[in-house]
Image (tube, rainbow, N blue to C red):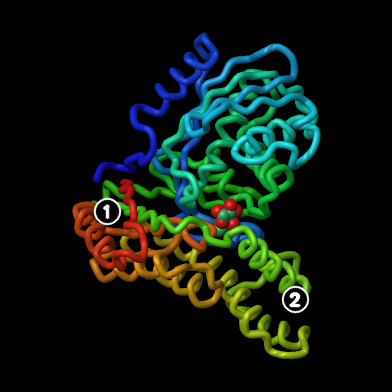
Amino acid sequence: MTDAAPSGPTGDVTDRATTGFLHRYGEQPAGRWAAPGRVNLIGEHTDYNDGFVLPFVLPLRTVVAAAPQDGPRWTVWSELADSPVEFGVDEVAGPGRVTGWGAYVAGVIWALRDAGHDVPGARLAIASDVPIGSGLSSSAALEAAVLAALVDLGGLDLPAERRPRLAQRAENAYVGSPTGIMDQSAVIRCRPGQALFLDCRTEAVEHIPFDLAAAGLAVLVIDSRATHRHSDGEYAARRASCEQAAELLGVPALRDVPVAGLDEALGRLDQALGRPDDETRRRVRHVVTENQRVLDTVELLRAGRIRDIGPLLTASHASMRDDFEITVPEIDIAVEAALAAGAYGARMTGGGFGGCVLALIDADRADAVAAAVTAAYPKHTYPPPNFHQTT
Ligand code: GLA
């Protein structure tokens, strides 16, 4: 196992973007812009509830090599696609006019133009080590790298702290996924060796020390290879159910229910619905307790007690499995096997219904834990998982 090994095309990702640009367009790019994949340490489905999240970035990147071209025209080549996509002002005039992977690029251009920016025409070449569909935010990495390229090429006035909302708007309104602000914030605002404590209501950030190597620890990222089954509809359903609960409780968002007020809030929910609704109660309980787990994790990390966050990670997983109901069998198997092999804590990370598990382990245990997880996967039922180790 190598650190955060790419599973797609090989060779340095920046070189691939550069040579891709050269071959495709017959000239050198004006520059290269990159954004990383992310893992969320804890705080799942809290972002669109105005709550707290704690992501950190992986040493896996999406790189965009780009140069200006005349007129409002954009040509986009990707190493993962058979042919480039091209679009002009008509395609970026309104949501949904470009579909597939090109929509993330068109969406960024649309959102920039909609915000009044004079977006330069450009040629782009994209290469990426962030696996697609694994819950490591390949889409946010693509949006952020394209955004950085266009902002620099056009000399646009858009400081880093204002970019996540714009990239999120591209994804929500143009691509049509109702995601929160976490992924774009993580890939734009995280710093290496630190986790990003983000208040999703105010967008205030604090960079929290997360020096795994110094503590002799590592995070093993286990790609379950279950690729987000039914994720779009289920994600939207979870979001709708949280928003409805907040409305019934008369609060702007579930973030406004403190863990100490949970029982009282659940009682009020029953009253408002005229009956106990077990499913809605469990959805609310997940969000409220998950926000508290983020705060508790931050406290421990501030005190340098990385190992001690393990039980919070595992409790987060149980809450996603039992209360929010967003895990799948491959994911639960990976979590249990990692814990049985000595992980301090383990949980699914990301939107759910597949994607990745993270396990906090002693750095020298990565191979043993990976082997235990692979052995626990029922053969012939699921493809074997992939692993990325990060310190
Ligand atoms: C996906 C979304 C995020 C967030 C997570 C769940 O990654 O893009 O906005 O809601 O799911 O925490």
Residue under pointer 2: 249
**Which residue occupies 42% across, 37% down?**
129
Query: Looking at the picture, how far across and down is residue 369, in whole percent?
Result: 24, 60
Front-most of residues 306 and 285: 285
Classify 263 as above or below 176: below
Q: Earlier in the sequence, mark 1 or mark 2?
A: 1
Query: Looking at the picture, how far across and down is residue 83, in whole percent?
Result: 56, 28
Disc ID at residue 217 = 1
Query: Looking at the picture, how far across and down is residue 110, in whole percent?
Result: 74, 33
| Disc 1 within 8 angstroms of ligand 1 (CB) | no
Front-most of residues 268 and 305: 268
Left or right of 271? Residue 381 is left
Residue 338 shows up from this direction: no
- Alpha carbon distance from label 1 to label 2: 42 Å
Disc ID at residue 98 = none
Residue farthest to the top, as pictured: 27
**Quarter of the rendered structure image containing ligand 1:** bottom right
Mark 2 neighbour class, 10 Å CA radius: few under 14, some 14 to 19, many 20 or more:
many
**Which residue occupies 52% across, 58% down?**
228
Query: Looking at the picture, how far across and down is residue 364, in whole percent?
Result: 19, 53
Left or right of 186? Residue 264 is right
The quadrant where residue 288 appears: bottom right
Classify 45 as above or below 1: below
Left or right of 344? Residue 147 is right
**Which residue occupies 32% across, 57% down?**
384
**Which residue occupies 67% across, 22% down?**
74
Front-most of residues 284 and 14: 14
Count of marks placed on residues: 2
Residue 111 shows up from this direction: yes
- Secondary structure under tag 2 reads helix
Mark 1 neighbour class, 10 Å CA radius: few under 14, some 14 to 19, many 20 or more:
many
The quadrant where residue 359 appears: bottom left
